[in-house]
Image (tube, rainbow, N blue to C red):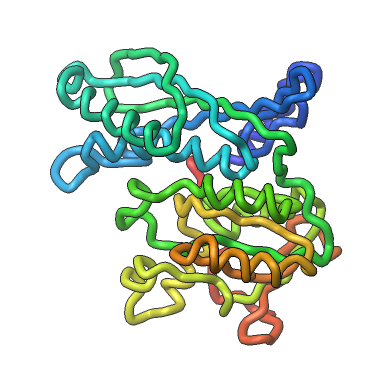
Amino acid sequence: MREFRLIERLKRLIPRSLQGGIPIGDDAGVVSVGGQSFLFTTDVIVEGVDFKLGPGGAPPEQIGRKALAVNLSDLAAMGGRLLAFVAAFGLPKKLAGVWTERLAKGIVGTARQFGVRWVGGDLSRSDRVFVSIALTGEARRPVLRKGARPGDSIYVTGRLGGSLLGRHLTFTPRLREARFLTRRFRPTAMIDISDGFIQDLGHLLQTSRVGAHVELNWIPVSAAALKGGRPDRPRALQAALTDGEDFELLFTLPAGRGGALEKAWRRKFPGVGLTRVGETVRSQAGKIVWWEKGRLLRRLWFREKGFSHF
């Protein structure tokens, strides 16, 4: 069974009365207390799936960094302010020593960098290494996936594709950028790109009940994707569309605000790209219509699939 079909089946088992301020399905859960919205998210990274050990594998400091950073990216996508987290480790006995201390140092360094408190956790013996972090934050107006309206512009930050060549361990969660967006421009919907551009755009469109027109030539392709795809640029574009773990922001904004955003962005974040890639349209929920060099693409030459755990 595919990952997202399984998630939908599990969601149906949870009564609405047990869910938070919004239905389950965004980058973080929302619970409202005394007029304040608190955000909760959790991610687990697993040896052999999210990182490799041994010769040529990831050092424990980078594994720890990634474990926290993927959660920070979730809260960025909700426009959240960080509060605290707990961490649980599953470890083979042979790694329960200096290696684990190095893992923890990677988490501590990332927590210091982004100003979030580590308030507890758990340890267990496991055949494979895994790190599970649960993070909480707050937001006055959480940005959800469901707010996009027909005619909104679709933007992405940074460049996409090729993350598994190394950036999936070293990426910077877009917390500063998300805070700037939510305070100054109020995106109508937002998500972080963890499972690939096509798949995550589909989640946003489906939840917002709109479709989209996307121009392939506007997709910002990373240097890593180009390097991996040389001399075949279409392969690089395929990577930008479907590779997981970019952890860039994908958001929608009323079209009239785009010019002001782009001008302000260049001043505020000169080292971080911002690209308009298309617009939302009144259409079948989740449907993407592709354009290439200004022409409607009637036959797709690329696969419309992203990452799935199953």
Where residue 93 sits in the image (x, y, percent)? 19, 16
At 74% across and 27% down in the image, what residue appears?
12
Quarter holding residue 77: top right
Residue 8 visible at all: yes
Residue 280 visible at all: no
- For the image, the number of numbered tags is 0
Residue 155 sits above or below residue 206 on the image: below
Where residue 16 sits in the image (x, y, percent)? 80, 22
Judge from the rendering whether residue 191 lies leftward or rightward of residue 150; answer left or right: left
At 27% across and 21% down in the image, what residue appears?
91
Quarter holding residue 211: bottom right
Quarter holding residue 304: bottom right
Where residue 247 sits in the image (x, y, percent)? 49, 50
Judge from the rendering whether residue 14 lies leftward or rightward of residue 28; answer left or right: right
Residue 41 sits above or below residue 196 on the image: above
At 45% across and 20% down in the image, what residue appears?
86
Residue nearer the viewer, 191 or 136: 136
Judge from the rendering whether residue 179 lies leftward or rightward of residue 164; answer left or right: right
Q: Quadrant of the N terminus?
A: top right
Residue nearer the viewer, 279 or 141: 141
At 44% across and 37% down in the image, what residue appears?
114
> Looking at this rendering, what residue extends furthest in the front direction?
267
Judge from the rendering whether residue 170 lies leftward or rightward of residue 39; answer left or right: left
Where residue 53 sits in the image (x, y, percent)? 22, 38
